[in-house]
Amino acid sequence: MRLLKLVPDDTNIKFLKWRVPFFVVSLILIAASWALVLTKGINYGVDFAGGQEVRLTFEQREEAPIPALREMVTSLGYGTPVVQEIGAPNSVSIRVPLPESGESEPGAATEIGNQVIEMIEAEYPNVARDGNNTVSGKVAGEFRQDAVLALIAAMLAVAIYIWIRFEWQFGVGGLFALFHDVSLTLGMFSLFQMEFSLQIIAAILAIIGYSLNDTIVVYDRIRENLKKYRKMDLTDLLDLSVNETLARTVMTSLTLLVALLPLLLFGPESLFGLVAAITLGLFVGTYSSVYMAAPLLIWMGVNSSSFVPQESAADLQEKKARGQV
């Protein structure tokens, strides 16, 4: 029985033929994304904007009814809450966004927490109150700062790794591809004003990991072909390398897409932002490996001698002494 092949072995698509227009479009999209972030802003969730935190323990239950709690608290009209398990399976933390009056009046914030508790106690009588506290804007600001530092550290670590494994040009290309992917993800959240929470930071880190994986596969094949085809034009060599890794890229992307699409279309609302970010990252990560990371190698002067060990003056002198030069 013949195996199913989504990509033929003799694929010869001229990807790099359109590198300039695609690169220009990418730069425009990056600029537009940051323009949206700076002008329209990002819709921060409770993690980054502050809010009221209620902590409860369901003493007569082994597990807290998290989906039901999320639906109940959402019905109060204060926005989408963050409901998560803390410590034991029957203990939860419920964080609710505060209206503008709640930020300026501590008593109003506590009252919102009391409303949440009273609604839950009416449905689940045997609930122990563990806390009703306000998450200040200062703490939320620290969360935002730490999240930004985590993303920058991840991207720099990736660039350094690629630099050490290949050449500095590859590190620059990989870093620029990651910057492209993160920028477009932030632009999507700003454009549609989707809630930006700690879940989305996790999604962006996953995007960085996927994009890095795809870029390294392409770069590794480029390095092999640079050693193998010393006289081939670099544009043709890059096309060859991308085509040789195309089957692996398509299969990986489709496998992830099969898992993501049901969650995106039929999954719970609380996971929509996370899944939407990873789905977008799947496409932009694959795109950037081909049209961002690869063309930059041409413009930064990578050639067939990039991975050939350079002979020292002593080696040349020894060859002359042996009459090999």
Image: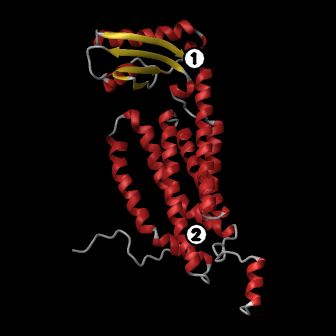
Rounded to the nearest angstrom, the CA distance separating label 2 from label 1 is 50 Å
For the point 27% across and 21% down, which residue is it? Answer: 62
Extreme bottom residue here? Answer: 323
Q: Position of residue 292 (x, y in %)?
A: 59, 61
- Tell me if residue 284 comes above or below residue 7 in the rendering: above
- Tell me if residue 15 comes above or below residue 77 in the rendering: below
For the point 47% across and 55% down, which residue is it? Answer: 283
The answer to which image quadrant residue 93 occupies is top left
| SS at circle 1 | helix
Q: Which mark is residue 18?
A: 2
Q: Position of residue 160 (x, y in %)?
A: 63, 54
Asked if residue 22 shows in the view, the reply is: no
Residue density around tag 2, few if under 14, some if 14–19, many if 20 or more, within 10 Å: few
The answer to which image quadrant residue 77 occupies is top left
- Tell me if residue 45 comes above or below residue 153 in the rendering: above
User: Which quadrant holds the N terminus?
Assistant: bottom left
8 relative position to 45: left or right: left
Which residue in the structure is indicated by mark 1? 100
196 relative position to 31: left or right: left
Q: Position of residue 200 (x, y in %)?
A: 49, 38
